[in-house]
Image: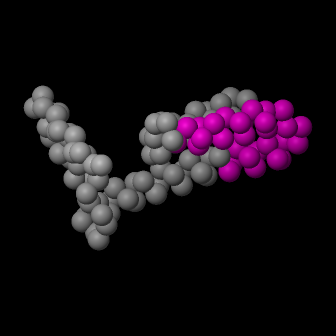
Amino acid sequence: MAGEAATVYRQLLKAVDKHIGKEGGKKHFRNFISEEFRKNKVLSDLEASRQKLKLASDYTYMLTSVHHHKDLLFSYNIAVDRSDEMKKILNKSAASVGLSLPEIYQP
């Protein structure tokens, strides 16, 4: 059970880092996950422990699926805001030839 919990914990943290981010204002997601896993580390009820692990696993799956769906919408040009996606594509293109885009001043 401990090995399964560690696997679910690692997968959840990887999904949060990848899809939500690690920067300053978003650390509370990682902190909440860490606190919940530490708090429930010594659950005596095996069924409650399994339910918590299932919930964490399901949330990981949902988080990954939502972002995969969003990527599909972007790739098919379905009516979504593409400004962030275009910035990402332009940055990748510029980086592939050794350049970087200038930062745009926003007061």
Magenta highlight on residue 48: yes
Extreme residue toward the left, this view: 97
Q: Residue at x 54, y 55 (%)?
A: 62
Residue 30 placement, left or right of 88: right
Extreme residue toward the right, this view: 44
Residue 91: x and y in percent read 20, 41
Quarter of the figure with the N terminus: top right
**Which colouring convention does the figure follow?**
one colour
Extreme residue toward the front, this view: 107
Residue 24 placement, left or right of 98: right
Q: Residue at x 33, y 59 (%)?
A: 72
| Numbered-mark total | 0
Residue 53: x and y in percent read 70, 44
Q: For the magenta stretch, what is the residue range? A: 26-55
Residue 40: x and y in percent read 79, 38
Q: Residue at x 40, y 54 (%)?
A: 68
The prevailing secondary structure element of the residues shown in magenta is helix
Q: Residue at x 28, y 69 (%)?
A: 78
Q: Nearer the viewer, residue 21 or 37?
A: 21
Quarter holding residue 103: top left
Q: Nearer the viewer, residue 8 or 74?
A: 74
Q: Is residue 26 visible?
A: yes
Q: Nearer the viewer, residue 106 or 61?
A: 106
Q: Is residue 8 visible?
A: no
Residue 60 placement, left or right of 23: right
